[in-house]
Amino acid sequence: MFDFLEGYDLLGAFWVTVQLTVYSAIGSLIWGTLLAAMRVSPVPLMRGFGTAYVNIVRNIPLTVIIVFTSLGLFQTLNVSLGADDFTTINFRLAVLGLIAYTSAFVCEALRSGINTVPLGQVEAARAIGLNFTQTLRLIVLPQAFRSVVGPLANVLIALTKNTTVAAAIGVAEAALLMREMIENEAQLILISVIFAVGFICLTLPTGLFLGWVAKKVAVKR
């Protein structure tokens, strides 16, 4: 029944999906944290930039962003991100697009966590001489991260599924292979089930593990 799988690198395609997810998750966490810091910053220009970025990017379809990285950045502006071959360029551009999109949701999740930190702790930090950056780094963000592990897990799961959009610019991940197999084989239902199970195997353990972590590190108030 599964003889048609011969000749297709199924594990390799899902490995590319995993790489897209990991690299994009790390980049999104970093950039999303910076955006959240901007959104609560006392500097109006930084607050305005953070707010504008989040509101604009969240309302742009991910497909548009991914396609723009290829057509706009690479083909028009010749941005190759230090890569030489077309495959690597597309992979890095897809990671960049996923980071740009997902970081907006990371920012909002983290900002909701920042809002849960009691104002008295921030005032106490200022009273002992800590500046905004020190207060954010030492007092606010550690508590904020602990309170939003659950929401961040949802963002990560959504990111894993969103990696399928990278197929639009030719990244050889699971969705691209699925489309190729459907075009070549007369096994539509079976192929769909195989890839559905593959994504469940990626997302379900992640959700269960991070849900357990969220309960362990939750801030008791």
Image (spheres, rainbow, N blue to C red):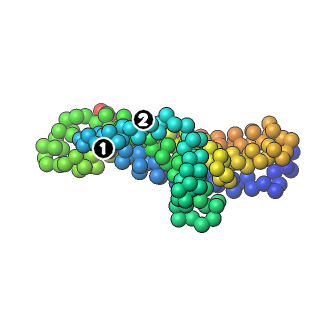
Residue on which the image places disc 1: 46
Element type at mark 1: helix
Q: Amino acid at mark 1?
A: Met
- Left or right side of 22 for 32: left
Report helix, strand or loop for mark 2.
helix
Q: Residue at x 69, y 45 (%)?
A: 175
Q: Position of residue 99 (x, y in %)?
A: 49, 48
In the foreground, 169 or 209: 169
Residue type at mark 2: give it: Asn
Which residue occupies the extreme front position in the image? Answer: 76
Question: Which of the marked residues, 1 or 2, is nearer the chain's N terminus?
Answer: 1
Q: Quadrant of the C terminus?
A: top left
Residue 208 x, y percent position in the rendering: 54, 40
Percent position of residue 74, x then y:
57, 56
Contact between marks 1 and 2 (CB within 8 A): the answer is no
Crowding at mark 1 (Cα within 10 Å: few <14, some 14-19, many 20+) = some
Q: Is residue 21 at all visible to an observer of this figure?
A: no
Tell me the residue at 17%/39% (across/down).
Answer: 123
Q: Would residue 42 be found to the left or right of residue 54 on screen?
A: left
Q: Residue at x 23, y 50 (%)?
A: 134
Residue toward you, 62 or 144 = 62
Rendered image: mark on residue 7: none
Identify the residue shown where x is 67% and y is 52%: 170
Q: Is residue 78 visible?
A: yes
Query: Residue at label 2?
Result: 55
Name the image quarter holding residue 85. bottom right
Quarter of the figure with the N terminus: top right
Q: Is residue 216 left or right of residue 157?
A: left
Q: Position of residue 197 (x, y in %)?
A: 70, 41
Check disc 2: other Cα within 10 Å, few if <14, some if 14-19, many if 20+: few
Quarter of the rendering containing residue 186:
top right
